[in-house]
């Protein structure tokens, strides 16, 4: 598409009926009406200083070191197709990247480089910025970009959340080569898989002594629904997806949330196999202990108070004597 034609198409999206047709058109409208951008703007991008880039990297916490192996594996899978891999912070600035040395000059020219800010407010509709704005996996392909200068790019991106469920940044595979349209679904699957592995690894590193449990399958989410559970069956951590599935908040985790309660689902939804298995384990422990809650708790590796809570939740009769 000719540059002038692209700018005309973008500005035509300000019409309310057209902006409702697609998420891309809605983003274009946001760029004009909220961010005050011009699709023909040719100013150089904002680039973080060395000190700002160090601060951005530090702000990634456990996510950056946990991402290294997945960045390597993702680049190994897509680098041959002329793609580079970017890991950004929540402002849209890449803090790490992978790319073929022979393509570095091209990628640097396009701004696909560490420290270049790709927020939607700065660069209009683009893979990283729009992914962060909408917090969902997406692809922005060539003339779906807002700025005319960026219509040669194709970007497939997934958001990444830190071990406390907060938006940490985005994982992006970008290319400036034509003909990647047929690869979009493959790229999307590869980016989603890598994003999940990064989140899971950061989560494991943050809760190294906890037992990890999964609340169902990830599905189309970029985040895996994982719980970190201590020896007393209490949730000490939850990923972004787990918080959404179980409607968990930081306050609920602080006050004490039972992993088994969450795995059982809403009241009235019926007992899960996990809960029935737990009921059997508690009954057997009580039987071996001759009805002693204290001894059964030691056998199960939980506190006496935790076992009492389990018995109440599982509707198990409390022994008349506790020796």
Image: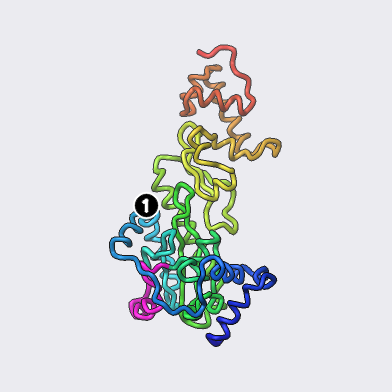
Which residue occupies the foreground of this view, 201 or 112? Answer: 112
Q: Position of residue 149 (x, y in %)?
A: 47, 80
Point out the stretch of residues depicted in magenta.
98-117
Residue depicted at x 53% and y 35%: 257
State the residue position of label 1.
61
Residue depicted at x 59% and y 59%: 220
From where the camera sits, is residue 320 visible? yes
Q: Position of residue 261 (x, y in %)?
A: 59, 35
Give the position of the N terminus as an image quadrant.
bottom right
Residue depicted at x 40% and y 46%: 206
Q: Indicate yes or no whether the magenta region holds residue 110.
A: yes
- Position of residue 121 relative to residue 215, above or below, is below
Q: Position of residue 222 (x, y in %)?
A: 53, 58
From where the camera sits, is residue 190 visible? no
Q: Indicate yes or no whether the magenta region holds residue 300.
A: no
**Residue at the extreme bottom:** 2
Which residue occupies the foreground of this view, 241 or 254? Answer: 254
Would residue 300 be found to the left or right of residue 64 on screen? right
């Amino acid at each position: 598409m000719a540059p002038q034609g692209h700018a005309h198409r973008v500005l035509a999206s300000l019409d309310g009926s057209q902006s409702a047709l697609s998420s891309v058109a809605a983003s274009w409208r946001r760029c004009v009406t909220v961010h005050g951008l011009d699709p023909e703007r040719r100013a150089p991008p904002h680039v973080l200083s060395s000190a700002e880039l160090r601060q951005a990297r530090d702000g990634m916490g456990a996510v950056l070191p946990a991402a290294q192996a997945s960045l390597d594996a993702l680049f190994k899978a897509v680098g041959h197709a002329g793609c580079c891999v970017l890991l950004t912070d929540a402002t849209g600035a890449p803090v790490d990247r992978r790319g073929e040395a022979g393509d570095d000059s091209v990628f640097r020219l396009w701004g696909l480089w560490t420290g270049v800010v790709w927020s939607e407010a700065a660069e209009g509709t683009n893979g990283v910025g729009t992914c962060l704005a909408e917090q969902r996996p997406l692809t922005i392909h060539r003339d779906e970009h807002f700025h005319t200068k960026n219509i040669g790019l194709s970007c497939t991106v997934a958001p990444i959340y830190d071990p406390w469920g907060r938006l940490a940044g985005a994982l992006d595979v970008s290319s400036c080569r034509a003909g990647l349209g047929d690869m979009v679904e493959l790229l999307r699957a590869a980016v989603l898989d890598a994003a999940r592995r990064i989140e899971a690894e950061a989560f494991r590193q943050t809760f190294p002594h906890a037992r990890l449990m999964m609340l169902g399958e990830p599905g189309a989410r970029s985040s895996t629904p994982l719980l970190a559970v201590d020896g007393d069956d209490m949730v000490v951590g939850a990923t972004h997806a787990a918080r959404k599935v179980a409607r968990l908040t930081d306050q609920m985790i602080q006050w004490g949330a039972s992993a088994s309660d969450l795995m059982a689902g809403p009241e009235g939804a019926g007992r899960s196999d996990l809960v029935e298995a737990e009921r059997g384990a508690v009954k057997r422990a009580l039987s071996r202990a001759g009805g002693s809650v204290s001894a059964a708790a030691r056998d199960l590796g939980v506190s006496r108070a935790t076992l009492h809570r389990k018995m109440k939740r599982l509707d198990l009769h409390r022994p008349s004597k506790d020796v």
